[in-house]
Image (cartoon, rainbow, N blue to C red):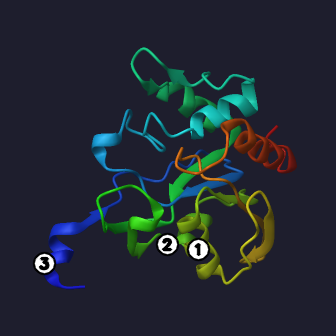
Amino acid sequence: MDKEIQSADIEQHPLKPFIPQHARLLMLGSFPPARKRWSMDFFYPNYINDMWRIYGLCFFGNKDYFVDSLQKTFRKELLVDFLTEKGVALFDTASAVVRTTGTAADKDLEVVTPTDLDALLRQIPECRAVVVTGQKAADVFTSHFQIVQPKVGGFTEFVFEDRPLRFYRMPSSSRAYPMKIERKAAFYLRMFQEIGLL
């Protein structure tokens, strides 16, 4: 990669990891969309991304529980309080990327700097499960830890520094992923039940 590309096109991650005290689950995406697509200053900020609707369905039976439809955004304070109470940490598997076509699609992201996943897990000593929400994140994570990639909806068990963990591969919350939100939510619901969050 030449210097011109490095200086002009490398995008650093715009958010710090969200790590509640006593977090038991770490959710990892690939990388946030471009700022112009953000509806709030938090993870999964694109209003047409369904992650927070999936959470609403799973925990409250209401896909709009975290949605502010008038403002076309999400209720960030409600989300932060909920995730803190449940012990859900959030970040992404890439800390710096190049968008090869300017989109947020995984296939158009070139990972320049992977996230230091070991350091991230060390900050969450009570974490017992990691979930990735897309193919790029799954590829980066399984390559780093040299573990088998489970099928969508499944998990693989692995050990990190004497800590047994489950690695879940969930359907992407992007609407570009061809699956109805209710079916996606059913995968997440089973995972939340298996790890004791529900």
Neighbour class for label 1 at 10 Å: few (<14), some, many (≥20)?
Answer: some
Which disc, if any, is residue 4? 3
Relative height, residue 125 to residue 142 (above, below): above
Q: Is residue 60 left or right of residue 49?
A: right
- State if disc 2 and disc 3 touch (CB < 8 Å): no
Residue type (three-letter) at the residue carrying disc 1: Asp
Where residue 160 sits, quadrant-wise, is bottom right
Relative height, residue 94 to residue 196 (above, below): below
Mark 1 or mark 2: whose residue is earlier in sequence: 2
Which disc, if any, is residue 116? 2
Q: Secondary structure at mark 3?
A: helix
Quadrant, the C terminus? top right
Neighbour class for label 3 at 10 Å: few (<14), some, many (≥20)?
Answer: few
Give the residue displayed 42% in from the left and 39% down from the top. 46
Mark 3 or mark 2: whose residue is earlier in sequence: 3
Residue type (three-letter) at the residue carrying disc 2: Asp
Give the residue displayed 39% in from the left and 67% down from the top. 109
